[in-house]
Amino acid sequence: MAETIETFAQRLQERLEGFLETCTVAHGECTIEVPPARLLEVCTALHEEAELGFDELIDLCGVDYAKYGEAEWVAGEATDRGFSRGVRGPGERLHETSRPETPRFAAVYHLLSLPHNRRLRVRAYAADEDFPVLPSVMGVWNSANWFEREAFDLFGIIFEGHPDLRRILTDYGFVGHPFRKDFPLGGTVEVRYDPERGRVVYEPVSMQPRVLVPRVIRHDHRYEVDRVDERKEDRESATTPR
């Protein structure tokens, strides 16, 4: 009989007792939070021990929790659960919440155990918001190479021990980290080819930042009352004997 995710989470907590900050199960998935000082030990155990067998790193991504939980939206069935607040209408804020007391930056590791057909999510927070540092897991999963470079490029997370931590998606002279919540929406520089100079030049951004609110126009016969009445009259007149 296959082991349930709850049973696995309990067994994982017992095996890694003292190494985990939290272990939760939600939506049929298990997530553990690991302090940075214990990250390599936990990842090594997850990879090496046969009863765990997480031999594949599917993905590694950075997360910026700045302003996390400060959003609000209009909801027909707002609830009081979660870190954000549902709003039933103008001035009807359901509840007050704020960002949880956690560091701003984190790295999230998605693992797959092929022998046991099981997945696991591992999260580690970088303690210093101004200079976020986490240990590299390349020694455990070599596939972390480009993933860590991507998280460094987009979020500015430093992976200590990475042998070649360079930008991988942005340009060589790019300044800043574009996936951070405080990065300007329009960026800081724009690039164009200057035919007079015969080369690419960098200039300050000339466009004004703006946020577009989409306008949705639905062509639905249920809301075209006049046309529905007209069609009804046409049908009635067509069936009326003369």
Image (cartoon, rainbow, N blue to C red):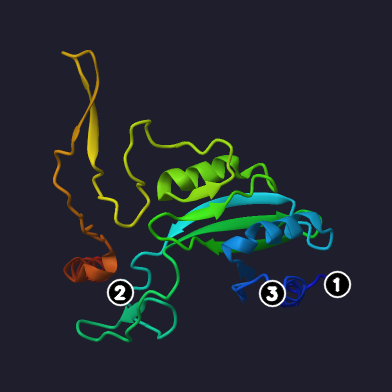
Q: Where is mark 3, residue-wise? A: 18
Residue toward you, 55 or 158: 158
Mark 2 vs mark 3, foreground winner is: 3
Q: Amino acid at mark 3?
A: Gly
Mark 1 Cα shell of 10 Å, populated few (<14), some (14-19), many (≥20): few
Name the quarter where the C terminus is drawn. Answer: bottom left
Q: Quadrant of residue 229?
A: bottom left
In this view, 20 is above or below 40:
below
In this view, 208 is above or below 132:
above
Relative placement, left or right, of 31 versus 112 is left
- Residues at marks 1 and 3, CA–CA distance in whole angstroms: 29 Å
Labels in figure, total: 3
Q: Earlier in the sequence, mark 2 or mark 3?
A: 3
Position of residue 105 measured from the top left corner of the image (x, y, whole percent): 44, 60
Q: Amino acid at mark 2?
A: Glu
Q: Where is mark 1, residue-wise? A: 1
Position of residue 20 measured from the top left corner of the image (x, y, whole percent): 64, 71
Position of residue 173 measured from the top left corner of the image (x, y, whole percent): 33, 32
Q: Quadrant of residue 27?
A: bottom right
Mark 2 vs mark 1, foreground winner is: 2
Relative placement, left or right, of 123 versus 178 is right
Picture residue at 76% right of the left edge, 76% below the top: 14
Q: Where is mark 2, residue-wise? A: 72
